[in-house]
Image: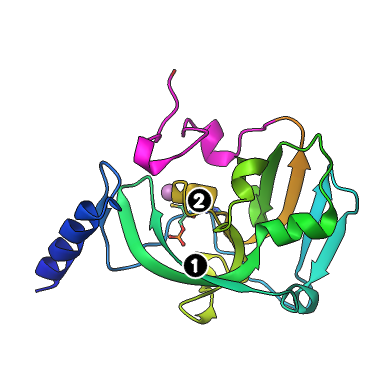
Amino acid sequence: MLFDERRDLENRMLAEGRLPPGQSTTLKFPVLHYGPVPRTDLATWNLRAFGLVNEEKVWTWEAFTALPTHTITTDIHCVTRWSKFDTLWEGVLFRDIVEMVGVKPEAKYVIAHCEYGYTTNMPLDAMLDDDVMLAYKFDGKPLDPDHGYPVRTLVPKRYFWKSAKWVRSLEFAEKDRLGFWEQAGYHNDADPFKEQRFSRG
Ligand SMILES: Nc1nc2c(c(=O)[nH]1)N[C@H]1C(S)=C(S)[C@@H](COP(=O)(O)O)O[C@H]1N2
Ligand SMILES: [Mo]
């Protein structure tokens, strides 16, 4: 029964061109990360934007959740070969953050820094896409601790390791700097439809 439901969905997504090569469908929401799940106290939590910006900013939880939000429904693809369709997220658009801090023209890359030192890097251009956000709700509810509570980045057009859980700061940089999985041999671009899983070498 569950198998049929999953197989039907998979065939439909394949027909619609939404299932990237080498992926299969999941109806669950798997949890994947390196290291422990942080315990966050919203009273002391903050989010910082720094580097090549006109004005560094720090948002408390109160200030961050007062910013305008957007909701998006999108597909997510993990390099470990599962894809999940029509996931519903709410948060602050990354481009709105960029607007608020005023990014300098030399800034070409964004490095997301998370609790316990996880990082992931992205070109600034790609982060300005209208589906990239700092998400703090999934399916209308606060994120689960396992899935990045209180805030994660969401970069749906890349493999899911580019979506940084427990994000605490956003660095704007002139030069690219490989993040945690990128240093471990994952592909720097991570486009699921080009199957950019691992870097050559
Ligand atoms: N801070 C942090 N974010 C992270 C990771 C991590 O280890 N630490 N793992 C990444 C990987 S490899 C994946 S596949 C997704 C998994 O997100 P999920 O657990 O919500 O499915 O988170 C990404 N973000
Ligand atoms: Mo992953």
Percent x, y for residue 192? 38, 43
x%, y% of residue 90?
Answer: 56, 73
| Cα distance between the residues tagged 1 and 2 | 11 Å
Q: Look at label 1 and name its amino acid.
A: Asp
Along the line of sight, the residue nearer the viewer: 195 or 151:
195
- Magenta stretch bounds: 176-200
Residue 107 vertical placement versus 164 (above, below): above
Q: Is residue 197 magenta?
A: yes
Q: Dot 1 corresponds to which residue? A: 146
* Of 177 and 21, the residue lying toward us: 21
Task: Reply above or below: 25 against 149.
Answer: above
Q: Which residue is mark 2?
A: 34
Residue positioned 77% across, 32% down in the render: 174
Instruction: Say whether residue 40 is left or right of residue 83.
Output: right
Quarter of the image with the N terminus in it:
bottom left
**Tag 2's secondary structure?**
loop
Asked if the beta carbon under badge 1 is closer than 8 A to the nearest atom of ligand 1, the reply is: yes
Give the SS element for disc 1. Answer: helix
Q: Is residue 97 visible?
A: yes
Q: Is mark 2 within 8 Å of ligand 1?
A: yes
Image location of residue 94, percent across then percent down: 67, 58
Give the residue displayed 66% in from the left and 67% down from the top: 92
Main SS of the magenta part reads loop
From this view, report whether residue 169 is shown above or below residue 124: below
As drawn, is 112 to the left or to the right of 101?
left
Residue 157, how many percent across, how many down?
Answer: 46, 49
Q: In the picture shown, does residue 2 fall above or below 77?
A: below
Label 1: few (<14), some or many (≥20) within 10 Å? Answer: some
Quadrant housing residue 177: top right
